[in-house]
Amino acid sequence: MKDSTPAIDIREKDLAHNRGAFRDCLGYLPPGIRDAVDIRYGLGGWAQELKESHSDCKLVGYEKDPGTSAQASIPEGHILNCREYEPPTLELCDLLMADFNNLTCRHSFRGPGPEPLIEAVEDLSPRYIIFTDTACARLHLNWRVSYGLSSPDMGEYWEQFPLPGYQLMGWARVHFHASTSVWARSRSAWARYKRKGPARLPGPEGRNRG
């Protein structure tokens, strides 16, 4: 699967697995999540889970594929922008959501490194982050050379993911090819990060309901 593969071209089984992992990660969040931004909205599976667990939360989503956005489910009170997310948006949120097709902590021939995620974090300053990573698909082969781990362990992988100012709360893996994690902003780490300045790593109209 490529980073640009639209959700309508992904198997329902795979989408359901990622939705299940997102549901598990939502269990780590406290009540009171009021505002969320989903920069990889897809067909709205994550938005539906968010609505069920945090019914008062207002979500703003972004989906660049016209065919996908036309078929997407939009829970009442949520907004879907039928275009690609591009910072700056001047929005702030409690929760940042991103179901990436191909994202790992390093660049690969299949997809980008963490830049799209970190750019969104710098723009939105979320309290919490839930996103999908696909390193687990080949972690048993390249855990040492590509990621410098002591073993092919997803827990160790997530602990060393470069997400400045945030700490790992937990992670879930329902699918062989993807794992989803949830992070919380650390006040002390975030303050140090902002003092240093933003990180720069190498390397159509909206639809709404209600």
Image (spheres, grey):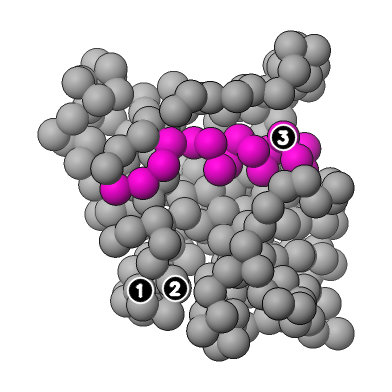
Instruction: Specify which label sits upstream in the sequence, 3 or 2.
Output: 2
Provide the secondary structure element on which disc 3 rests. Answer: helix
Q: Is label 2 in a helix, a strand or a loop?
A: helix
Q: Position of residue 182 (x, y in %)?
A: 57, 42
Q: Between 106 and 148, which is closer to the camera in this rendering?
A: 106
Per the rendering, the mark at residue 122 is 3
97 sits to left or right of 55: left
Q: Which mark is residue 10?
A: 1
The stretch of residues the image draws in magenta is 110-125
User: Is 75 displayed left or right of 6 in the figure?
Assistant: right
What is the tally of numbered marks visible in this picture?
Answer: 3
Residue indicated by mark 2: 7
Residue 153 on the magenta span: no
Q: Residue at x 86, y 47 (%)?
A: 90
Mark 1 and 2 residues: CB-CB less than 8 Å, in contact? yes
* Amino acid of disc 1: Ile
